[in-house]
Amino acid sequence: MRRSFLLIVLIITAFQVSAQNYRLYGNITDTDGKPVSFASVYIRNSTYGSTANEDGDYEFKLKPGTYTVVYRSVGYLEHLEKITITNHNEQHNIRLGNEPFALQAEAGSGNEADPGADIIRKVIAKREGYLNQVPGYSCAVYVKGVQRLVSAPKKLLEHGVAKALQIDTTGKGILYQSESISQYNFENPDKVREFMTSSKTAGQNTAFSYNKASDLQVNFYKNSFNIQGLSARAFVSPFADNALNFYDYKLLGTSIKSGRRIDKIQVIPKHEHQAVYQGNVYVIDGDWRIYSVDLFLTKKSNDINFVDTLQITQQYIPITDTVWLPIATRFNFQGDVFGFKFKGYYLAIYNNYNLNPQFKKDFFNGEVLRVESQANQSKNSYWVSNRPVPLTDLESSDYKRKDSLGAIQNTPRYLDSVNKAQNYFFTLSNLIYGYQYYNRHTRESFYTYPFYQTLFYNTVEGYGINLKVNYIKGFDNGQSFSLSPAIRYGFSNKKFSANIGGTYTYDPAHQGVFMGRFGSDILDLNNVGTRTLVFNTLSSLLSENNYVKLYRTRFGIAGWQRELANGVLLNTTLSYADRQQLYNTSFNHIKDFPDKHYTANNPLAAPPTVESPLFPTNQALTFKASVTFTLRQQYITRPDGKYYEPSVFPKIRLNYRKGIDGILGSDVNYDFGSVDVFADRLKVGLVGYSAFKVTAGTFFNHRSLYFMDYNHFLGNQGTTFNPTIGNFHFLDFYDYSTDRSFLEAHYEHNFAGNLLSKVPYLRRLKLEEVIGVNYLTQAQHSNYSGVTNNALIQGVKSNYSEFYIGVQRFIFRIDYGFAFEGSRRITQGFRIFYGLR
């Protein structure tokens, strides 16, 4: 509480607000009297500044005194005004003249001989020095965002669409507004910690959002950077070390601003459909540093998502005689989705830079953002006093209307009616998506799984039902409790199974969870997963491919999980199971294939269609433990919980599993250990991102274990596949399961459209190209020892490998690959994914 209070005081001070302050306000126009939107306004020899709004209105909160105010905007003459604040508000309207950039006689025509290229070379030579010039800083940041609907098809506004979007029936209006005030802390090269003390939103965010200061951290001194949400590609800075391979430059002219010579340079892509910008940059001659940028990306040339055009503008000011940092960054965007035309902006204003913040040793502890508990409780009077950019009339009226609407929508009567409508049972929808009931007063929810996941068929149980429900109870402190009972019955083998499980999240801030489950069930012999009930039902009935092999268990399991330190997660379980082999009892199909027959429920049976014993009924007491290390784990703390950010480094997981014999009649005695090193998304410069997973493991002791205790792999049989890294495309579910040492490796690279974007017509599809390889090798073994008599021979397997290429778009993906045993190709074909596993 004390820290929150100090932060609020600091932010208020940062924006120069006190009881003795007065308003300096006015309107900024051009020579024709038209407003100059988003002009930068700051106090000279300070780091206190603001930006005009869309209508050109600006305002400051200033103590009495005399100030030199700088008015500045791209394309206009810089204007300095000496203004004295006494004991009342002051209005100063400003007219900015168009800036004449004089072109020198020796200027070229846009090729490498152009002086613009020489200027850029000088900036590039100093790029790294300016990038690392400031070890760290802190500042106050105000972020403002607006999304507006410009027009919409009238027919599509019917049937409650306009009401849902909270706009009028003309198809125009503000869809979404957001504001935030934060204390932003940075340490070179990439350590960030932000404290958001105030936040305000109105409306529905229908596109993308940059609501925090770190979302708008654009640094053109970096060789490249990603624009989150709009593209998987990284875009090359016009000042990158290799920028001249991507851009041509043309010096458009020079101008004098505050005694400095400013060069205006046009940035021209050498080729279309590359990850590059267009527009103009402004460079301080002699210092060879960035003065401002005005660049843009387009859907047509850069294959960005959601919007047609994105404009990035940034203004730098001197913090000291030698250090320049941004005072304002703005993203302007516009687009058209199914006839809904929209535009908007996100704006960040940086004030009160402190270049010597003296961070404590453990200040950057992985928490990149903390949203204070009262951040969204600030009253309107607070925002009137503290927002540095005045609202336009449209923005102000939209806030008032939505605040009034929000007051109605937050009444108990309205919330109860919404809750009741959401709980309405609609047969068709609930059959497809399941049914969820939620009680907002008690924070209880009840979910039943969809119909298609309830009925199933397999050759062991025949037709069957698998009923599952989930109950969750939430508490005010973030803790929660859940129960998930399940019953299963096979009409052919006439076996009834029932079990119930529960979890108690006792420490949500550290992923602290107790869990348990007991009862009976039918399980897959491959304990890391094969096919879902749905896909196994379809493959069995439609093509007589009963891929999944099952066994019956009566079990009890208890587990505990907790984060021991930031980035160190411990998970442990202790289980006891009585395990029984099952056999095929049903052979139904929709279409008969004379040349195909169902295989036995024993995956190692020889011949494969003849039932034979795989293991005797046995009991197993098993202990498991894993520790996952996430290097430099980052997270966001909000009032409703802790949210983890994707790691930019690989993760490491250590696993141990022990079969304990002699206790409760347990028949197993083995020790297994493995290590996983994996990453889901590693950026690789301009050519997309990679994912990989490497696992090595061994059984230190394998005196007594059964097939379900083996180490199994994420294989795939059938046309659909799981695209998650670590899954094979063609590997048999059971053939390679092992009780010896093994090594598996997976690597995949997504080119993020860098290749197909250069192909006419195909670029319109915005496909992302994928290549990958999967590999498995293991120590040779000659037999399976789970059966004491009539032992089954398992053939020695060679090294297994897969190679594939593919394309994807959102959740849709299609791959074509080849599988090899040693150097012998064993299969090839297509694999598809469309959101279901």
Image: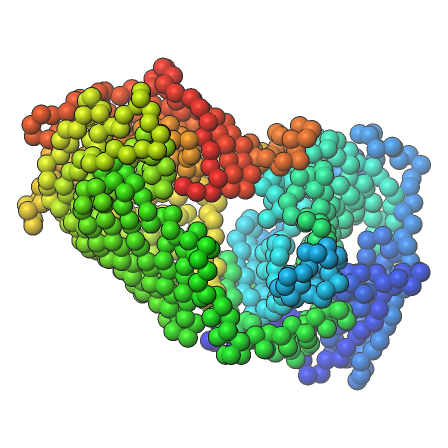
Q: Is residue 470 left or right of residue 174?
A: left
The x and y percentages for residue 457 are 30, 40
Residue drawn 66% across the image and 28% down it: 759
Q: Is residue 821 left or right of residue 397?
A: left
Residue drawn 94% across the image and 36% down it: 105
For residue 729, which quarter of the picture? top left
Count of numbered labels shown in the rendering: 0
The x and y percentages for residue 77 are 88, 56
Question: Vertically, is 167 above or below 134?
Answer: below
Q: State the residue in front, 818 or 599.
A: 599
The x and y percentages for residue 482 are 31, 62
Question: Vertically, is 695 above or below 75?
Answer: above
Question: Vertically, is 565 above or below 236?
Answer: below
User: Where does the C terminus fall, quadrant-wise?
Assistant: top left
Residue drawn 32% across the image and 65% down it: 481
Q: State the residue in front, 79 or 308.
A: 308
Q: Is residue 586 visible?
A: yes
Q: State the residue in front, 383 or 50.
A: 383
For residue 305, which quarter of the picture? top right
Q: Is residue 725 visible?
A: no
Question: Vertically, is 580 above or below 169?
Answer: above
Residue drawn 73% across the image and 55% down it: 153
